[in-house]
């Protein structure tokens, strides 16, 4: 992370329905703290519940205007899937830095299909099991040796990162082990939709399943099915999260001073 520290605190919104018992949420907070401490940054972060985000695009944009970066968190099904999709649309259309992990990544694909490609019937099998078009469906190949009762895709698995992508530049590796905790993944029957109109596949599993996407013509817009926060450490902040914070720092320099600070934020 080579971004210089801005004068004002960096504001990061954690979009999701916080559950202190969910490791994917508590480690997300920790991973932001790791970056703040390692780089001497002032960061103000808060969890923004999905029902609090207006569904109409203009209203959602106003509600999220004070934030420099949006993290679409793990933890679906969301209390308001429409709220999560509205936040993703704001980031996509307004050039606001975004990282989306696990369920957040899944909803990035859903937002793209519905609002960019016009496929209003595209659905998530977890939210609409009877839909005709499942863009996201149950994990087809369970990971062996996972903990009893854990999701089908959980624990560590190998990720293959495409060269020439932003994700490859950020990680600096073509292969990396990352931690998962989910039961749903992109449906390979609709793979061609994940490389249309500005979106591209940036990471895959050993068997070619989609594990990461990005928008190259965007300041920072990366979604991954794995949860990088789970492997972040104080002495080694995860590079993907550090890159997201860096992009959010850049955005904070362009934020008009008259925009009021959001409520509920916590200084990290």
Image (cartoon, rainbow, N blue to C red):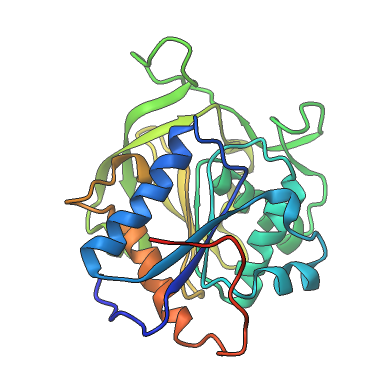
Image quadrant holding the N terminus, namely bottom left
Let me know if residue 163 appears in the view: no
Give the residue at the far top of this rendering: 148
**Above or below 9: residue 190:** above
Q: Quadrant of residue 129?
A: top right
Q: Position of residue 143 (x, y in %)?
A: 40, 20
Tell me, yes or no, if residue 146 can be seen here: yes
Q: Name the residue rendered at 78%, 52% in the picture.
A: 119
User: What percent of the width, then of the height, locates residue 35?
Assistant: 29, 60
Q: Is residue 133 left or right of residue 15?
A: right
Say which residue appears at 40% left-offset and 76% top-offset. Answer: 249
In the picture provided, is 89 more to the left or to the right than 99?
right
Considering depth in this image, is 138 or 263 the residue closer to the camera? 263
198 to the left or right of 56: left
Q: Which residue is at a point 60% across and 75% down the rendered structure image?
A: 66
As rendered, which of 18 and 160 lies closer to the eye? Answer: 18
Position of the C terminus, as image quadrant, is bottom left
| Residue 219: percent from left, percent from top | 47, 75
Picture mark count = 0
Relative to residue 92, is residue 52 depicted above or below?
A: above
- Quarter assignment of residue 198: bottom right
Front-lying residue, 129 or 179? 179
**Residue at the limit of the structure toward the left, as seen here:** 235
Residue 201 horizontal side relative to residue 82, left or right:
left
| Residue 125 drawn above or below residue 200 | above
Image coordinates for residue 141, horizontal then vertical, percent = 47, 21
């Amino acid at each position: 992370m080579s971004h210089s520290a801005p004068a004002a605190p960096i504001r990061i919104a954690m979009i999701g329905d916080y559950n202190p018992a969910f490791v994917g949420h508590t480690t997300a907070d920790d991973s932001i703290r790791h970056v703040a401490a390692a780089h001497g940054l002032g960061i103000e972060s808060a969890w923004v519940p999905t029902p609090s985000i207006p569904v109409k695009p203009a209203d959602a944009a106003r509600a999220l205007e004070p934030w420099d970066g949006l993290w679409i968190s793990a933890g679906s099904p969301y209390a308001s899937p429409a709220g999560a999709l509205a936040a993703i649309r704001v980031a996509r259309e307004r050039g606001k830095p975004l990282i989306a992990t696990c369920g957040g990544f899944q909803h990035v694909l859903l937002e793209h299909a519905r609002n960019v490609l016009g496929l209003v019937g595209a659905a998530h099998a977890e939210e609409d099991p009877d839909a005709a078009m499942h863009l996201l469906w149950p994990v087809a190949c369970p990971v062996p040796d996972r903990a009893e009762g854990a999701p089908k895709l959980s624990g560590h698995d190998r990720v293959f990162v495409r060269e020439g992508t932003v994700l490859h530049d950020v990680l600096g590796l073509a292969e990396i082990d990352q931690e998962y905790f989910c039961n749903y993944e992109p449906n390979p029957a609709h793979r061609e939709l994940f490389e249309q109109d500005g979106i591209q596949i940036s990471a895959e599993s050993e068997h070619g399943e989609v594990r990461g996407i990005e928008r190259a013509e965007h300041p920072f817009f990366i979604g991954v099915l794995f949860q990088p926060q789970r492997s972040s450490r104080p002495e080694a902040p995860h590079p993907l999260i550090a890159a997201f914070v860096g992009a959010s720092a850049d955005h904070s320099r362009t934020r008009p001073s008259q925009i009021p600070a959001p409520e509920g934020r916590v200084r990290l």
